[in-house]
Image: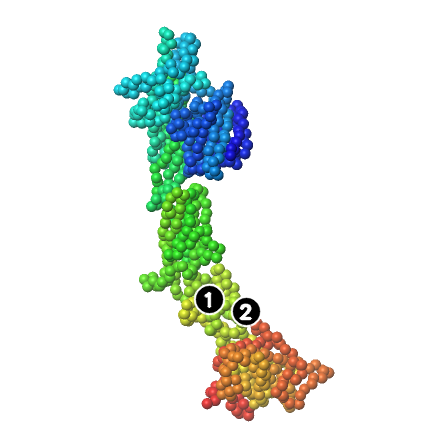
Amino acid sequence: MTLMLCFRVAFILSLWTTVWCDILKQGVLQMECREHYFMVAIDLAVTGPNPQFEAVDMTGGHPLTQQYAAECGYSINVLSFLGVVELRSSYFSCHTEKNGAKFLFYFKLNTNLDGNVTNTLNATCSPPVPWAPREVSCETNYMEVSIEYESTCPHQLSEDWSSLRPAYSTSPSEWQVSFQKPGVVLAPMNFTEARKQGYVFELKNGRFVFRTPYGQPNSYITKANGIQVEVVQASVFSRRGWFVIIVDLVAACSMDQGMLSDGYMMWDTPEALYSSLGSTQIRIGLNGDLVGQVNAKQKGFIMEKRNNTVHIGIPYNAVGGYRKTLVSGGIFEFRIFQMYLKQVSVDEYQRETVVKFQRTLVTPLTPYPLVTEDKTVLQEGMFTVFLGNVPDDVDLTSIQLNGEQFMLPLPSESTFMITEEAQPDNTFSYTLKMLFSDRLVVQEFSEEHEAMLHQLNINYTLTVSGSEPYHYTTSVTALLDVSPPVFEANCTAAGINFMLVHQPSDYLWEFSIGADLLTMELVMRRGYIMNNSSQTLELNAPLFTPGYDYRDVSLRGFYGTFEILVRDHDTLRVRASTVKTCYFESREFIMCSTDGMMTVAADLSEVIPSGQMPVNFHLYNKLCVPNEVNGSRVLFSFPVNSCGSVIKLRENVTYRNKIFHTLNFQTGDDKGVTVECSYPLNGLSRLFSVYRFESDTEGKGKIIHDVQATPGEVVPTPTKPTPQPETTAAPKIIIPNYLPAYHPPAHYIRVTRVHSLPNVFYRGSNGYFRTKRNPIP
């Protein structure tokens, strides 16, 4: 399978252009015709990790092996840290064709990712600037020198140069080359023999070209101003009649590897690699993009000349550099810079020499410390742990919490959360949040601090492609006060309000009203009002809702006490309580206690004829008289199964009685107020015992007012009280609510017991039964 990667090249801004076909889809990321070379960058995902290029000319394809590429002017660089492979080809490379002012490049790329696939790449370039008389390329794998024909003789002999030109047209086999090394005499050889040793000499495109890989036997290392320089010095000559033509070809390149110093990657080269009358001009850049000295300094580069040495400094965080992370017993980073340097000098004959350096500079491994911070706020009730300064090529793959491993990303049902956030410095941070109450958190009481110690041991697993996993551990603790919480309580006319400010240790406690835990179900069933926000818990207990304990009940008012218990979450043992007692006033109310006492305050003004004042009040049993009388208002307290109460048995047991009044010189009036207490049948014990009454819950009371007859209205009345009071005149039922009413509505409430009231009867001086505190023996 052959896939044509097609390009058409023309001039843009008098330089060049490229028209793409479908190659972009095949992974070509960049392709440019630059001043001294052609380059193309291809995605490694397309080429595979070991791309194989061939240079193609009229004779066929030539595999670019490492040695052959260096000899023929090709540089192949696999930049795995970028995920690309970069091919650079000199305009004087072995298999580049020239058509007028245009250079033609033909390549094949062989991949085996999808079988054996050959991709063909063709490109045409026109050099954007004219070349100097002498051009020197210090590539990453070879040195190349090219000299114009006209530059091989001084200006004073230039008029005779045309007579020497025929010598260059002779066969290369007639040319000889002699290498010079300090203190060594080397025999000359012809071009064919030199080519076998890896040297290339060509008369090409109007220039004399010499190319050699680094480290050849005839090269040598010297030091200039303390900088290592590799030099290959060759003299090419040919005898033509009376003339001997000699061309000195010298390739000299700085071999400095660079050094990290004070935040800069420093690289040095001698200023005078080639003879120069004055100071050299320098341009520098990264990834093939050159900028002048002024612009380079604005970008933070150092470009200095001291003691015949050029000092180049690249900022550690320079734009265009590449950062790579390595994990090996810790996290380390190093920086990679693809430096491109152009150095121009002028000799005494005003001839320019241009030296270009392509260097890959790598900084030493530098420890890359991670940053952890305990951002826990106790009031939030959770651990908040920050992990920062994580390099962008490092992945957090799992986390271990108190010995339990979790892979990332976390499932949606996880009891904790980890958030990732990109930082401006191209790093990432991770924030872990976990409630103190989470089952993974270790909890134990600290006697030293007299508080509950919460501990979370964290082990982060970080990975980098091509490296072993790195485990980073940290531990956080939190001390929580274990004192039971206390509610703030306030009295209102309608009940008691409780408020609790949430604390981190709230999860250690349960709240209850008596034996019943405070839940939303209990709140709705009993008629409380509760609001549980992130900051506070507010509970409003309206007057006459279950849970109140009443004392000193009279017609003037009474005391109501409400208690919230604080229980241990695990044992439910009561550890503390908040008790609030308030004084309330209510014109009518009824209380049905668990011990079977009905306490009722009723207003009979609706059933008493206008202008009349009763002389007596009583229940069905006329011997049962009120505990307190104030005008038309009366207070009774009696056992539910006494005083002639009528019992109705269905799902509930209902005890009903009625309050009557007696006017002067009038008897037998049946108008009054009906009162009743209802108890759940399944909550009663000793139901019909005359000595003891017990109920698991308070009863539900009701006050029913008879309607006062208007003049001319006939109200049917029975001849005597009946145990079926529901057959009397149509009653007016006051639907109870939870706010105290003044007149005429009534309230019904359920209470455990009523204090400070008599609970048995005695005969008073006027012959009526009243009550006293001592129970029946």
Query: Which of the 4 image quadrants contains residue 509?
Result: bottom left
Q: Is residue 5 visible?
A: yes
The residue where tag 2 is placed is 524
* Residue type pointed to by label 2: Met
Q: Is residue 390 above or below residue 526?
A: above
The residue where tag 1 is placed is 488
Q: Secondary structure at mark 2?
A: helix
Q: Looking at the image, which residue sits at the far left? A: 183
First along the sequence among labels 1 and 2: 1
Residue, x 52% and y 82% (percent of image)? 596
Q: Is residue 529 above or below residue 69?
A: below
Q: Secondary structure at mark 1?
A: strand
In space, the residues marked 1 and 2 are separated at their CA atoms by: 22 Å
Local crowd at mark 1 within 10 Å, few (<14), some, or many (≥20)? some
Residue, x 54% and y 86% (percent of image)? 641
Residue 369: x and y in percent read: 36, 45
| Front: mark 1 or 2 | 2
Q: Is residue 739 left or right of residue 289?
A: right
